[in-house]
Image (cartoon, grey):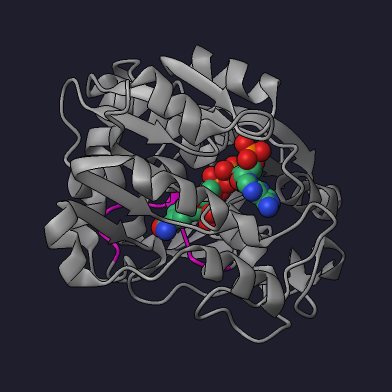
């Protein structure tokens, strides 16, 4: 089969397409013919070798996909061998075939395309876990979403809106803030041209927000933490500010981003009455029931028209390097998808 390999840690150019054997499913695994790959920022951080648990090159990256089941392992009960599915594989989806544990895949609804299927699970599960399970976002609360036009960002806006929150969105261009508004944000701020913290203070009359969804970190964290009102919940799910548009991620940049996120002394959280959560969907192994319950609720919301994934741009497999570059250099809106087979 054709597969894209990370040949060494580094920028998009380290990806090379080559040949690999079609893998054999283990007892709980399903072999899937990949139709579309959904790119995630974690693919980029992993490619730089900066994501905990990233294997040594060469390896086949890719944690999200849609496709057709072609073979099932002996313990698989969930699929019969013909379904259109979307899944979360942790690694290996940048290929014509991928293995997925049966518990981390689900059937694609009839009206959902393969492109949308490859764009659904990771973003929606991240937003769901943060806003529903951890922050327990409630009607009338104020939610601030950073990088709001991205995959997780658009998912968070829609779920925030569904839970009747007052939604504030930041993004890096006016086209992105326009998109955020069309996906339900009540207030939008281009944080590359406007001081977002002053703007949030102004709109809320100094009261701040109840929940922050922060996947950017660094300076954005430094300015957002003080915006959190008493009883507030801060969700820290990524540090995309540690990469640059020209394809760099160095130890110095990681150190700089971390330096800006001043250490939080746990007892001080009592006195200021704020909570902070970190989470990592990559560590979902062993949480099969959780995945099932969350995916079921998200698909119910999808079928009711409450949430939908936005396929921002589709690249052919041969242009996987360009697809990575497009996501890394902040050009993307919604999800970046790579079409593997028609
Ligand atoms: N913890 C978890 O379980 C989990 C799960 C999924 C995703 N994540 C994290 O959530 C974040 C979003 O992931 P995603 O796949 O949906 O990506 P994305 O938001 O679609 O794309 C990344 C966005 O980050 C913003 N950004 C800010 N500073 C940046 C910089 N220096 N370089 C590049 N981008 C920068 C850009 O939006 P603007 O131009 O609007 O700033 C960019 O479009 C990532 O940090 C990812 O690691 C975490």
Asked if the stretch drawn in magenta spans residue 77, the answer is: yes
Query: What residue do we see at 65% from left, 87% from top?
Result: 56
With 59 as the anchor, is 91 left or right in this view? left
Q: Which residues are magenta?
A: 76-91
Query: What residue do we see at 48% from left, 30% from top?
Result: 198
Q: Position of residue 248 (x, y in %)?
A: 79, 65
Q: Position of residue 46 (x, y in %)?
A: 62, 70
**Residue 36 seen in this snapshot:** no
Q: Quadrant of the N terminus?
A: bottom right
Query: What residue do we see at 26% from left, 23% from top?
Result: 165
In the image, residue 105 above or below residue 59: above
Q: Quadrant of the C terminus?
A: top right
In which image quadrant can residue 132 be found? top left
In which image quadrant can residue 209 be found? top left
With 52 as the anchor, is 330 left or right in this view? right
* Observer-nearest of 31 and 314: 314
In the image, residue 43 above or below residue 309: below
């Amino acid at each position: 089969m054709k597969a894209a390999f990370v040949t060494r840690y580094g920028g998009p150019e380290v990806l090379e397409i080559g040949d690999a054997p079609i893998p054999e499913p283990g007892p709980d695994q399903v072999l899937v013919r990949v139709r579309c790959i959904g790119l995630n920022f974690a693919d980029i951080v992993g490619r730089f070798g900066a994501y905990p648990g990233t294997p040594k090159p060469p390896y086949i990256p890719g944690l999200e996909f849609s496709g057709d089941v072609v073979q099932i392992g002996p313990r698989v009960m969930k699929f019969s061998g013909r379904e259109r599915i979307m899944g979360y594989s942790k690694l290996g989806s940048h290929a014509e075939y991928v293995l997925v544990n049966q518990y981390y895949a689900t059937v694609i609804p009839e009206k959902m395309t393969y492109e949308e299927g490859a764009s659904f699970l990771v973003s929606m599960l991240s937003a769901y876990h943060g806003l529903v399970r951890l922050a327990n976002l409630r009607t009338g609360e104020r939610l601030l979403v950073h990088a709001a036009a991205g995959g997780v960002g658009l998912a968070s806006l829609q779920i925030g809106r569904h839970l009747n929150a007052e939604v504030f969105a930041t993004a890096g261009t006016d086209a992105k803030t326009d998109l955020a508004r069309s996906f339900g944000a009540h207030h939008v701020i281009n944080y590359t041209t406007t001081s977002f913290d002053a703007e949030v203070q102004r709109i809320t009359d100094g009261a701040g927000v109840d929940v922050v969804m922060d996947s950017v970190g660094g300076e954005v964290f430094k300015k957002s933490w003080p915006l959190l009102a008493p009883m507030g919940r801060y969700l820290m799910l990524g540090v995309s500010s540690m990469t640059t548009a020209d394809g760099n991620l160095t130890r110095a940049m990681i150190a700089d981003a971390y330096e800006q996120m001043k250490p939080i002394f746990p007892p001080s959280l009592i006195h200021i009455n704020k909570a902070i959560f970190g989470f990592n969907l990559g560590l979902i192994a062993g949480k099969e029931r959780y995945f099932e319950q969350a995916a079921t609720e998200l698909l119910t919301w999808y079928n009711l028209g409450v949430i939908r994934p936005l396929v921002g741009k589709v690249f052919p497999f041969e242009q996987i390097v360009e697809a990575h570059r497009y996501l890394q250099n902040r050009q993307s809106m919604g999800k970046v998808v790579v079409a593997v087979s028609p």
